[in-house]
Image (tube, helix red, strand yellow):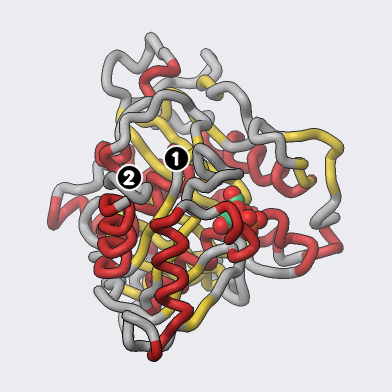
Amino acid sequence: MRRVTLTQYLIEQQRQYGKVSPELRLLIEVIARACKAISHTVSKGPLAGIGDAVGLDNVQGEAQKKLDVIANEVLVEANEWGGQLAAMVSEEMAEPYQIPNRYPKGEFLLLYDPLDGSSNLDVNISVGTIFSVLRCPTNCSDFDYKAFLQPGARQVAAGFAVYGSATILVLTVGNGVVGFTLDREMGSFVLTDERIVIPDDTQEFAINASNARNWHPPVKRYIDECLAGKSGPRDKDFNMRWVASMVADVYRILCRGGVFLYPKDAKHKEGRLRLMYEANPMAFIVEQAGGAATDGRQRILDLQPTALHQRVGVVLGSKNEVERVTRYHAEG
Ligand code: F6P
């Protein structure tokens, strides 16, 4: 069997479809290399001090874990010198990181969550890295943070790594979605899923049910109908899963379908997840895999961001279920 590595895949995308410029290819390869380093550290578990707190809060007011900080540094150090980027935004940095003057600047902007799901670290459950790539809209050397505030539809690439029993890298450059598995002996990401497609229908939903008392009526209606199963209006039984690592929940949906909800509710008035480096890249991936992603009312990729770390409600996954939840919101 011919083994296709990440590099080969990207070069083929460049040759056949003109989708990936050499600069974008290098950028994606560097991100993937950083993910390998993070994967290596995560796999050491308690030996790497996993789960230790550093005693600080990140911009979201969540306690930073030692590994959040390490993963952020790995991504900054890997990406700052190559000449592909103008600036970076990370969940772990309040302000955008500008490329130091000693390095050349490039045309791309990188946004990432270095360690998604990190509250799962100390219990040995999958975590991951999410990233999104935008192009500088104007002159990159005269950088302004507003350059980041572009709707997700303008992403040129997005992906995420899941550090689970295997390390998987999911990627889109706007030409479908592919999955790579890390071959630890060879140190390379090998293409193991050349076309990820989310089925339109599903009987599996993912939501943190402990928020039920705060849900708005359309979400409550949708979940109640799922729970009613065969004896309810849906006339079919549903299963429920919630890993509490978005990377793991979305990867499951990419593999076998499902719908993921972290909606706005009475407690999370703006939503819980971050638009720029969680919802946008996941929405791009899910749409490229044939699924759908809305904030309950609007397509996530059409939202005009107003702040780097803004939150958003998220409903994504199998198309027919996402459309149903969105319709329930429209019906009030
Ligand atoms: O942003 C982070 C995140 O950990 C996601 O990965 C996950 O889907 C969600 O938060 C889990 O939220 P909760 O702690 O409410 O289950």
Q: Quadrant of the N terminus?
A: bottom left
Amino acid type shown at disc 2: Ile
Q: Is residue 223 above or below residue 301?
A: below
Q: Residue at x 38, y 83 (%)?
A: 232
The quadrant of the picture showing ligand 1 is: bottom right
Instruction: Indicate the quadrant where residue 326 lies.
Output: bottom left
220 over 184 or under it: above or below: above
The image position of residue 36, as x and y in percent, is 58, 58
Q: Is residue 189 above or below residue 57?
A: below
Tell me if 282 is positioned left or right of 172 in this view. right
**Res. 15 in view:** yes
Residue 92 x %, y %:
64, 35
Which corner quadrant of the image does residue 192 belong to?
bottom left
Q: Nearer the viewer, residue 192 or 57?
A: 57
Q: Residue at x 40, y 24 (%)?
A: 306
Residue 9 image label: none
SS assignment at label 2: helix
Of 309 and 140, the residue lying toward us: 309
Q: Which mark is residue 300?
A: 2
- Front residue of this view, candidates 183 and 324: 324
Q: Is mark 2 within 8 Å of ligand 1?
A: no
Q: Quick check: marks 1 and 2 in contact, CB under 8 Å?
A: yes
**C-alpha span from label 1 to label 2:** 8 Å
Q: Is residue 241 left or right of 3 when viewed as pictured?
A: right
Q: Secondary structure at mark 1?
A: helix
The residue beneath circle 1 is 275
Label 1 CA crowd tier, 10 Å (few <14, some 14–19, many 20+): many
**Marked residue nearer the N-terminal end (1 or 2):** 1
Q: Quadrant of residue 47?
A: bottom right
Q: Kindly identify the amino acid type of the residue bearing the numbered disc 1.
A: Leu
Number of residue marks: 2
Residue at image location 23% in from the left, 52% down from the top = 174
